[in-house]
Amino acid sequence: MTHGLKARPPRAVGTAPPHHAVGLRWVPPVRARFVLGSVVVVLALWQLAEQFGVVDVQFASTPVAIVHAGGDLLSSGELWENAQTTLVEFFAGFVPAVVVGVPVGMLMGWKLRIRQTLEPALVALYVTPSLALLPLVVLALGIGEASKIAMVFVEAVITIAVNAMAGIRETEPRLVQAARAFCAGGGAMFGKVLLPGALPTIMAGLRLGAGRGVIAVIIAELYGGTDGVGQLISSYGQNFDVAALMFLTLVVAVFGYAVTALLRILGNVATSWER
Amino acid sequence: MTTIARPRRRVPEKAMPILLGGGFLALVALLWQIAVWAGLVNPFLTSSPALVAVALVDQIGSGLLLRSLGRSALELAIGFGTAAVTGVALGLLMGRYRYVDYVVEPYVWLLYSAPVVAMFPLLVLVFGLGSPTVVAIAFLMSVVPVIVNSAQGVRNVDKVLIRTAVSFGAGETSLLRKVLLPASVPTVMAGLRLGVGRGLVGVIVGEFFAGDGGIGYNISSFAGHLGTTEVLASVFVVVVAGVLLNVLARKLESLADSWRTELP
């Protein structure tokens, strides 16, 4: 009757990790073993399924074939050449998005009238798929780099601004009141209370924005373009070269994960005083 | 925390946000229209609010809008519906049994950071061009937040509640039905709200690449014929649909949570 609970180790019942530290908790060896084991077993089963003809190679490819395709793409320099284009497009869109999004969002969080003016438009864009604007952006800016940069900018700036606004608004009101009671001016209030309080949420916004930006640049290149990783995916996909397609998708996933992880580390450094 | 800040926001008349926010949108539309009238911009490239309104009325009149909306809505309903069922079930298992969590975790994160839409050639190969592929993309995109949030919801359930239920002789099924599910409702609902948003992205973008009908397909095919006005009309419909879906999801979210009594 109670075997469900007994099966769990006592630590898990007694000391649950605090909610905010879930992503940072120490990885126990047992977890690493299970994760690794699961990946190895799935890859092995996948490979064996092909060998015994359980699934069609044309549809599902094989792990070995994917590695081969990846080796070819890397050694021919095709991947790196296209990745450079994509990286330039991504950062050309993401950096301005940070520069514009953070101040606008903070201003919206700080000044009531500005928030009331801009919030409906911003939130409407935030909850709708702004990728729907892609054909329009391509019509306006052509299929060159400009349309990709614009898409990354739009996707990232909305997320960043919404989070910056939320960060300012979630500042502990008692801190604001205390600062006001000690006659803090606008500058001091902003620099010493609002900005430090909002920094964790702002960094979370940058992370989310970067993730959405990576997807945006790939989809924009997929939609039309002359080079870039998305275009590479599109051309291999149209030839139904599934192994190369899967390898490239994996590369994008790893890149998105790496950017997110980098921003997470940056955010932890920037808010290290918090702990 | 916010209860203290609220009086400060409520001091101005309640109409202010509507006045300022609506006024801003109206001003943008007006400036746009004036720019077209004054000949500052070429209406072929930028269209105008009046032209978009006419195009919308045309699309409603010809039945195209309703047909496309119905199709996209059906794709979203099937994709998100299956994602909700499998996502909640898998999330509950992952939250309850940590070995399931460890085994499934890497694939969830892979699915989260991979551009699912980029896999459309593969999905087309498997499902064929058209709605089934769009449904599959919507499913793959919306299932991730549902899984992650459901698992988190179960993990965060008060351990005292679980121990109490178990010591009163609750089996695994009644523990699930009477403790775990009710206690994780807010987090699960938040996951579903995020999921439906990503599902909408999946339907629209999926139709760009693999669709043969629906709002996203219309956007991309109108754009192929340089029909800026028609594209804007369809984008407007998508924005309205997105906002309505979000409002609906938030309403459901607070409704599902309304039985909970606040503890002091």
Image: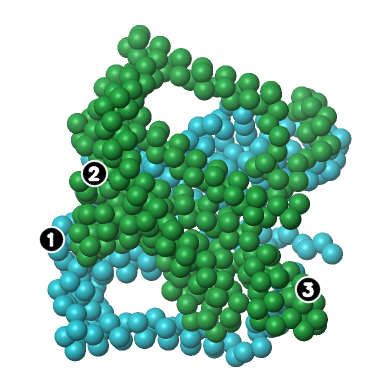
Chain colours: A green, B cyan
Q: Chain of mark 3?
A: A
Measuring from the top left, give residue B139's x and y in whole percent. Answer: 42, 43
Q: Is residue B10 above or below residue A140?
A: below
Measuring from the top left, give residue B221's x and y in whole percent. Answer: 18, 56
The one of B206 and B25 positioned closer to us in this rendering: B25
Q: Is residue A230 left or right of residue B164?
A: left
Q: Is residue A40 above or below residue A203?
A: above
Q: In the rendered structure, which amino acid carries the disc numbered 2?
A: Asp
Residue at the image point whose x is 32% and y is 27% from the top: A74
Q: Are marks 1 and 3 in contact (CB under 8 Å)?
A: no
Q: Mark 1 and mark 3: span between their CA atoms?
A: 57 Å
Measuring from the top left, give residue B8's x and y in whole percent. Answer: 69, 83
Q: Mark 3 and mark 2: span between their CA atoms?
A: 53 Å
Is label 2 or label 1 in front? 2
Q: Which residue is the site of mark 1?
A: B225
For disc 3, the neighbor class at 10 Å (few under 14, some 14 to 19, many from 20) is few
Q: Which residue is the site of mark 2?
A: A227
Q: In the rendered structure, which amino acid carries the disc numbered 1?
A: His
Q: Which mark is residue A174?
A: 3
Q: Quadrant of the N terminus of chain A?
A: top right
Q: Are marks 1 and 3 on the same chain?
A: no
Residue at the image point whose x is 37% and y is 56% from the top: A92
Find numbered disc 1 in the image and state the secondary structure of the residue it sits on.
loop
Q: Chain of mark 2?
A: A
Q: Chain of mark 1?
A: B
Residue at the image point whose x is 54% and y is 75% from the top: A108
Figure label count: 3
